[in-house]
Image (spheres, helix red, strand yellow):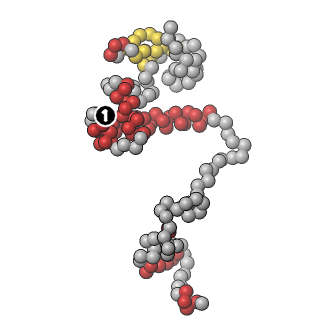
Amino acid sequence: MDDLSGFCCLNSDCPDHGRRDAGNLTVTGRYGPHRERRMLRCRTCKARFSERKGTVRFGSRLDSEEVESVLEHIAEGCGVRQTERLCKVNRKTVARYSRRAGDHVQKVHDAFVAVSPSDPRGPVRREMGLRGQEGEALRPSQPGDDHRGEYFDHLEPERLRRSLVKRLERLGYQVTLTAQDEAA
């Protein structure tokens, strides 16, 4: 007996659409190389669909191991051409599976978010620290290195001044600049 508890009807008009382990699915046949893929049928709406429908592997001509290998390399941060070389598949194939996986993950995420309970505190924001606020700087500080984030600003101060004055004027301010040594 086939375990179909992880599957649900994919027909959006079906009353059992999206309900897993509802007992409405049966295996009507097998297809593919070595006939290992199952064709499922919903008893409620009579729709037929592959067990791979809606997944990255639907319509795939690659073996499951090859698809997994491609996706593992992409997940590890390998580029398309590097994955092409390591997995011995065409770069267009790598890009296609990468897009499919991204689309699939987006749908899974949306499905989980739709059934997630709302937080009574309201939307939760993740607090992010910036370099130099808490923790260590990304590179070790050196004597005279007190500008950190403004590295390029001190290289061309006149260009920075002009840029900032233009931004303020675009916002409707009239800008008069006085040098610090004159103001002191």
Q: Classify 162 as above or below 118.
A: below
Label 1 CA crowd tier, 10 Å (few <14, some 14–19, many 20+) = some
* Residue 79, quarter of picture: top left
Q: Is residue 167 visible?
A: no
Q: Is residue 71 left or right of residue 125?
A: left
Q: Classify 180 as above or below 1.
A: below
Q: Is residue 18 left or right of residue 162?
A: right
Residue at the image point whose x is 45% and y is 20% from the top = 51
Q: Is residue 72 left or right of residue 138?
A: left
Q: Classify 41 as above or below 122.
A: above
Q: Which of the two residues, 125 or 167, is positioned nearer the viewer here? A: 125
Residue at the image point whose x is 47% and y is 62% from the top = 139
Q: Is residue 114 left or right of residue 145?
A: right
Residue at the image point whose x is 41% and y is 41% from the top = 76
Q: Which of the two residues, 35 or 132, is positioned nearer the viewer here? A: 132
What residue is disc 1 on?
A: 87
Q: In the rendered view of the protein, which quadrant contains the C terminus? A: bottom right
- The three-letter amino acid code for the residue at tag 1 is Cys
Q: Is residue 132 visible?
A: yes
Residue at the image point whose x is 44% and y is 10% from the top = 28
Q: Residue furthest bottom?
A: 182
Counting every numbered tag in the picture gives 1
Circle 1 — which element?
Answer: helix
The spot of residue 170 in percent (x, y) is: 50, 73
The spot of residue 54 in percent (x, y) is: 45, 27
The spot of residue 3 in percent (x, y) is: 52, 14
The spot of residue 122 in percent (x, y) is: 69, 46
Q: Residue furthest top?
A: 1
Q: Classify 96 as above or below 25.
A: below
